[in-house]
Image (cartoon, rainbow, N blue to C red):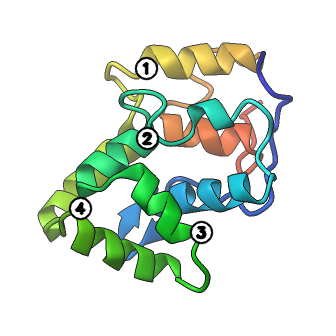
Amino acid sequence: MPLPYPTVIPGLRSPSETTLGLVYFGRMLDKIRLAAAGKLPEGWEVARGLAYKNSFDDRCCRFLGIDYAALEAETLKDGKTDEELLEWAFIQGRRPTDEEVEVWNGFMLKRGWRDSGAQRVHERLAEIGLPPGTVETMFEFIDLDEGRIVAPQ
């Protein structure tokens, strides 16, 4: 069952916000921290981390060449900033080139627009009672669903 729309979660940033130029990574850290504090909605736990192949968390960890459980453990240690955690990820896994980051960001920002993710965007829109085309990408849907943008009338 979908959560009420919009699903406003204080402390959870937009997936398009960047950490050292990389989209999504900061949101993944937010989800880790919020889950540890018991502040994620019920039902989100099963979708965190690597629960689903090709989830954004899974894709991000594979892109960086890191283990999600190790990232989670490092994130929950006291005192590291998001930037320090991304530097940790670069050391543990790999440091993508500027061009790889550009391709990653472009792919993630456009996921769902005229690609195999489009059907999922349409399904998610239907879950909250909005027609296909209300938004075109999964990042836009997330921002809509979480109250950061308003559906066009």
Give how far apart the Cα atoms at labels 1 and 2 are: 15 Å
Foreground of the two, 127 or 49: 49
Cβ atoms at labels 2 and 3 below 8 Å apart: no
Crowd rating for badge 2 (residues with CA inside 10 Å; few <14, some 14–19, many 20+): many
Amino acid type assigned to the residue bearing label 1 in the image: Ala
Q: Nearer the viewer, mark 3 or mark 4?
A: 3
Give how far apart the Cα atoms at labels 3 and 4 are: 25 Å
- The residue labelled by disc 3 is 76
Mark 4: which secondary structure? helix
Give how far apart the Cα atoms at labels 2 and 3 are: 20 Å
Mark 3: which secondary structure? loop
* Quarter in which the N terminus is drawn: top right
Q: Nearer the viewer, mark 2 or mark 3?
A: 3
Q: Earlier in the sequence, mark 1 or mark 2?
A: 2
Q: Earlier in the sequence, mark 2 or mark 3?
A: 2
Most extreme residue toward the bottom is 79
Residue drawn at (49%, 42%) of the image: 49
